[in-house]
Image (tube, rainbow, N blue to C red):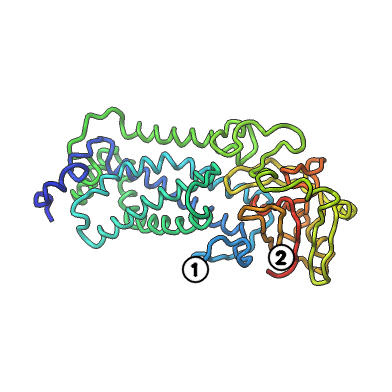
Amino acid sequence: MPRSFLPTRLARGPFAPDFWRSPLRGPWFTSVLGVVLLAGVTILFVTGLLSYAAYNPDLAPVNDKTPDKGVLGFYLFSWPTDPPWLYRLTQGVHVTLGLVLVPVLLAKLWSVVPRLFTLPPARSLTHALERISLLLLVGGALFEFTTGILNIQLDYVFPGSFYPLHFYGAWVFFGAFLAHAVLKTPVALRNLRRMREGDEERADEGAGERGEEEADELAATHPDPPTVSRRGALGLVGGGSLLLLVTSGGRSFDGPLREIAVLTPHGGPEPGTGPAGFQINKTAAYAGIRAAETSEEAWRLVVTGPTGTVRLSRADLLGMPLHSADLPIACVEGWSTSDQWWRGVRLRDLAALVGHDDPVDVFVESLQRRGAFRRGALRANQVADPRSLLALSVNGEELTPDHGHPARIIVPAAPGVLHTKWVARLTFGEL
């Protein structure tokens, strides 16, 4: 329907062509941002799937927090234990890149917002598919980035569990993103080629050569006088991303940036000094751990296997062969510790104690009274690794209550939630 025949009331406000007056909007500006997001969001999606795999969701419903996932929950391999910093890297990239892309995403959404108000709603089947993908893309992006940032800050203000919400939201977002990319990437690449040949104004003019509709949806019909160039605007977006990188990336890696990573949990200087001076998420008090139940007299580790059940005190465990491993803790929120020196009993030795000559899966239960991972499971390949320990001490000192006294799990390359603290029971066998 020609715009001149549209009802007057619909052609006012944001539906009016001259409502959007910024001279920055145009195909070239949008194309540059779109290509950056094409690469960045693809990396985010892949590292997100790797995080899903790291939780080993096929261990029955023990670790799987995504009910009724169907084909979306495809699972290709058991998460490896080498290199030991693998999850630290993949989840650090996922969280840090997510934060770094926030200015790019906001700029991209701002650049295309006139399209949401274009009339008529659909001019063709292709245009209708593009509009639907755009609506799903905008909604999915806002949902994924918002829930992800809230999770990073440990602010669980959204209803339901973060894990399934973020998982299903990621598939909706990436499906819309993929459809939009298929439809728009050729246009974006043509605009960038024109940029190499000339400048952004020529790229914007080239859009008009392919159809006035596309140019009109992005560029203002009556633009205000420019106060900054499009290249300058991209510089501001890039500067915002760089600032977020500097103030968040350090908590995922060792180095001088750790102390200025103020936008991630546990940002700033290390939490105190001494053997226990490294990060935690949940204290013993938060988990409801009482000193009386972790005392030498009261606490016993229950270990179950095909030959029966044994109950071990800390003294019994300290009397077994002890081994050491230098391993970090890396959490889903993106923060990680430096390598800590752990010492304890190998999980595979505890499996052998109850009749498993070959390592098998293990179901781990904690004294913790609340929280999604007060119970967790580890695969046989994780139990088999000689660095996988039921740790009794760290950095040469007995575990503190907040670090899991009297005993905790430590496994190379596993997410922090699977490093169960205040362990009460280990059940070895196929899960």
Q: Residue 277: which quarter of the image?
A: top right
Please state the total of marks drawn on the protein image.
2
Question: Dot 1: what SS?
Answer: helix
Q: Is residue 284 visible?
A: yes
Indicate which disc residue 235 carries: none
Q: Which residue is mark 1?
A: 71
Label 2 is placed on what type of residue? Asp
Q: Residue at the spot x=11%, y=47% of the render?
A: 8
332 with respect to 171 (left or right): right
Q: Residue at the spot x=39%, y=57% of the render?
A: 178
User: Percent x, y for residue 303?
Assistant: 80, 62
Q: Badge 1: few (under 14), some or many (20 or more) residues near its Cα, within 10 Å?
A: few
First in sequence, mark 1 or 2: give its number. Answer: 1
Foreground residue among 231 and 222: 222
Residue positioned most to the bottom = 306
Q: Is residue 429 above or below residue 218?
A: below
> Quarter holding the N terminus?
bottom left
Q: Is residue 75 above or below residue 343?
A: below
Question: Dot 2: what SS?
Answer: loop
Label 1 is placed on what type of residue? Val
Q: Residue at the spot x=31%, y=49% of the render?
A: 190
User: Percent x, y for residue 32?
Assistant: 36, 43
Foreground residue among 320 and 94: 320
> Quarter holding the C terminus?
bottom right
Q: Badge 2: few (under 14), some or many (20 or more) residues near its Cα, within 10 Å?
A: many
User: Percent x, y for residue 163?
Assistant: 53, 55
Pointers 1 and 2 in contact (C-beta within 8 Å): no
Q: Residue at the spot x=33%, y=45% of the render?
A: 31
Q: Which residue is mark 2?
A: 361
